[in-house]
Image (cartoon, rainbow, N blue to C red):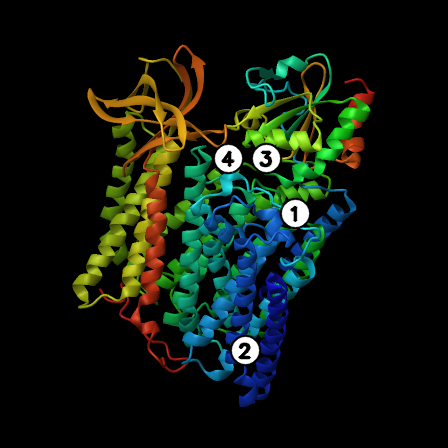
Amino acid sequence: MIPELGHFALIIALAITVVQSVVPLFGAARNDAAMIAIARPAAYAQLFFVFLSYLALTYAFIVHDFSVLYVAQHSNLLQPLLYRISGVWGSHEGSLLLWALTLSVWTAAVALFSRHLPDVLMARVLSVMGLISIGFLLFMLFTSNPFERIFPAPLDGNSLNPLLQDPGLAIHPPMLYMGYVGFSVAFAFAVAALLGGRLDATWARWSRPWTTVAWAFLTFGIALGSWWAYNELGWGGWWFWDPVENASFMPWLVGTALIHSLAVTEKRGVLKSWTVLLAIMAFSLSLLGTFIVRSGVLVSVHAFATDPARGVFILIFLCLVVGGSLALYAWRSETVSSTGSFKWFSRETALLLNNVILVTLAVAVFVGTLYPLVLDAFGLGKISVGRPYFDNMFALISAPLLLLMGFGPFMRWKSDDPTRVRKSLSVVLAVSLALGMVLPFMIDGALKVGAGLGLAAAIWIGITTLQSYIKRFRSASKIPLAFTGMTMAHLGVAMFVAGVTMVMTYEQEKDLRMEPGSVYEMAGYEFKFLGTRKVQGPNYTGDEGRIEVWRSGELIKELNPQKRVYNDQNNPMTESSIQITLMRDLYSALGEPLGGGAWSMRLYHKPMIRWIWLGSLFMTIGGVLAVSDKRYRRSRVAKPGVVKVQLAAGSRP
Amino acid sequence: MVKKIAPLALFIALAGLFLYMLTQMNRGEYNPRDVPTEFIGKPAPEFALPDLLEPNQMVSSSDFRGTPWLLNVWATWCPECWREHGYLNSLAKQRGIVIVGLNWRDELDKARQMLAELGNPFARVAVDKESDAVMDWGVYAAPETFLIDAEGVIRAKHKGAMNETVWQKKFAPHFETGT
């Protein structure tokens, strides 16, 4: 009964969404206040019914209702409560429901928090979001209904891959979806502005906080996925350039570009149509990610059940949303031409370059992901575009971006003097380069140009970011949160770059055979294997390795990786032992006993790998701080068309 | 004007491409899951792993030299493996194909129970708890099936459940020509 209610709630939600998107759109065109007023309550009602439906599915999971096919396929009696709740979005149908729920949450949030918006614009925004929601609800009801029953119901369901039962993985998809779907707000604002033909600085101000929140969620979600892969898969990798990863990374790159171009449009009223295009692109790539993952056009280690019929549906939907909005763009963007102007040497140019580079990166990832499939589909042979392509391409294209990041915050809006910038930054640049080049030499006595450049970039970004913050601190009595947020995020990038450079240059992974008493040296650490001892846990027995880690004659830590056999199953589980410090991870895991007390063993040394996730966390916090800036909570903003020249960094000497 | 239309034109081209790929998939002429493994035509990686049914014995890839055999990667947590099980049974019983199971990251009692309930198509079942062989063989996901010839060279590979169409297309030719 409950699943039927959930199904029914979904149908009601669809009906409400149709009202939410059609009526206000007409109302906005005819300036009919009554029709316009429907948008907001409809958005709340939609959220209510989608949420009801979501609760019904969660309930079916919690009470083990195996007469629901989806529940039977993706949970079983022994599954802990947490993984039954997260099991809801563990596979195709349920994750679509989560997508729809996330979209309703964003829609209702826009309805709730944007009360100061003109009613007509509000009506258009909610209506566009409704149109997207219609697509998803239809898709679910017609091709992927999570409430489908089976008869006779099985007594127990399938097990999940034990690898997937992990808290990190459980919250990874909702975070990603909050990011993906969050870009729909910027998209809806862009389309609404195109429809209304009025696109000004206030438009950018309204969509900015929403975009930044979505971006922060996406950043956090991607970082979480990477952290999970490192911890759980035990392969020691943190990013695999897997198509599913790329599908989330492309919207991130374009979203990052969008955040910056929105800043330009808000502050200076220029680059308007480019910003609109980016808003459309960011969300289109999110949809494309869904298409790629769900249609089976791409395969990956994230093996989802795939179905070409679903692919056709998503493709049609994609054409309507993306094709429709791009057609609208082609038709209407003339009306939103920019009013302001700027000289070539200005912060506007720096941010435009930032955009060009970020979009180029997204295109390169896009090509690397799709090119092999296209070749294959045309029967031109199968090739594999692997790590080397992505790694090299990324380092090459992002290098100028990292250089630019140091200059950007220093440059003034509208027009700046090259000699001024050169004077204040050339010393920093030289110092960063020198430090970056010397550091690898200090680490292992070898000169490494690639590593040197990477570290130099991190130092350069770190120093310039702090420098501009201090400068701002001196000149203004109070620093806005938005500026602090930007500083945090840029510092995060510096940490991330440092972490990636160090890991990729100096990481060591070793599988080896060790006898009691034998010593293996790695990265200046001596791993001394003392042998194993039997351990008895509450519900397991096992072997525990004793590995002493020495550095220059000093005992640092004893690592105790275990091999456990739990009582209720004869499944040996590997418990790795990792010593984490800010500067490096030392990882050890027991393999198999090789007789005579010897064991196969896995040892990793990962310098500064924590900086990768710490940096991402800084970026996320930076985004959250930026949104918390109180100027976004001011009720009415400056008159449209008037560009407010803020006391931004660089706008004062 | 061109600048305004360019994004739309690009997207239309892309959509056309996707449509083509989907139609090819629906016709069965293109399957992105057919990732060629660099292992095809190469000697099969060696493994020596415990036997599922006789835990104190080892199953080794070299045990099967001299006869073509299939290596099937499976697990009880993989619903697709349950679906292909009946077909594997018929391959083994009716056509006498030697199938070696590679039980991947599984609970052994459940695995044994599954074989007891659904029948056992496998000549031997090796237990790969730590994904050792799975990594060596470049397995993406379960189920996955390899064909190894009498000389120990990998000749074919299929990702996903086995069925008659796949068998006729990818596997049967190797048996007829004697490899």
Q: Nearer the viewer, mark 2 or mark 4?
A: 2
Q: Say yes or no: labels 1 and 2 on the same chain.
A: yes
Residue tagged 2? A42
Q: Secondary structure at mark 4?
A: helix
Contact between labelled residues 1 and 4, with CB atoms less than 8 Å apart: no
| Residue A633, above or below A314 | below
Mark 4 or mark 1, whichever is nearer to me: 1
> Gap between marks 3 and 2, in whole Å?
45 Å
Mark number, residue A388: 4
Please name the residue shown 58% across and 69% down the image. A329
Mark 2 and mark 4 on one chain: yes
Q: Disc 3: which chain?
A: B
Q: Which residue is mark 1?
A: A154
Give how far across and how far down residue A622 sits, in percent. 33, 57
Give the side of residue A335 with respect to residue A560, left or right: right
What amino acid type is highlighted by mark number 1?
Pro
Q: CA distance from mark 3 to mark 1?
A: 29 Å
Depth order, front residue of A473/A73:
A73
The answer to whether the residues at label 1 and label 2 have Cβ atoms under 8 Å apart is no
Q: Earlier in the sequence, mark 4 or mark 1?
A: 1
Label 1 environment density (alpha carbons within 10 Å; few <14, some 14–19, many ≥20): some
Residue type at mark 2 is Ala
- Badge 1 marks a residue whose secondary structure is loop
Q: Chain of mark 4?
A: A
Label 3 or label 2, whichever lies nearer to me, is: 2
Q: Which residue is mark 3?
A: B140
